[in-house]
Amino acid sequence: MPENSIDELIKWVISVDRRLILMESMKRHTAVRASDIAHESSRSTQNISRALKELEVMGLIECLTPEKTTWKKYILTDTGRKVLEKLEGKYL
């Protein structure tokens, strides 16, 4: 995982809509799937899947079902929770 400060991660998240949509969804759900968020946000599943991969690479979320090829479920990491806390009220 790249070493980033929480503030840098927040800037990174808010710089792209799909990332912010994903964090917003993480606020409401313990575990998320791309298709569920896509349906909720009227975005394409591909768009949300890309956001999931981006957040996973940055260490904000982790996959609960990495062995699956589809219907993967993701949860926030400790870092992801810290970022979400700081986003709440300000950006979400």
Image: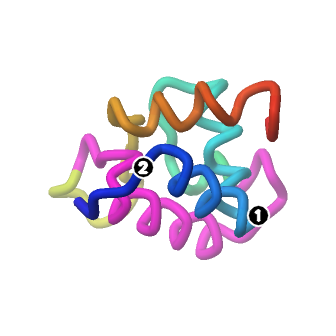
- Residue at figure coordinates x 55%, y 47% from the top left: 7
What secondary structure predominates along the stretch shown in magenta? helix
Residue named by callout 2: 5
Quadrant where the N terminus is found in the figure: bottom left
In the displayed structure image, the side of residue 69 where residue 75 appears, left or right: right
Spatial CA span between label 1 and label 2: 20 Å
Image side of residue 1 versus residue 34, left or right: left
Residue 31 marker = none
Magenta stretch?
38-65
Instruction: Tell me where residue 9 appears, x and y as whole percent.
Output: 51, 54
Is residue 5 positioned above or below 79 on the image? below
| 46 in magenta | yes
Other-residue count near label 1 (Cα within 10 Å), few / some / many at <14 / 14–19 / ≥20: few
Q: How many marks?
A: 2
Of residues 84 and 3, the one nearer the viewer is 3
Q: Looking at the figure, which quarter contains the C terminus?
A: top right
Which residue is depicted at the point 60% across and 50% down? 10
The image quadrant that residue 58 belongs to is bottom left
Residue under the image location 53 percent in, 56 percent down: 8
Instruction: From the top left corner, tell me how far across and down residue 13 is, in percent.
Output: 62, 57
- In this view, the residue in front, 74 or 24, is 24
Residue 91: x %, y % from top left: 81, 40
Amino acid at the residue labelled 1: Asp
Instruction: Write down the residue under mark 1.
Output: 17
Q: Is residue 12 magenta?
A: no
> SS of the residue at dot 2?
loop
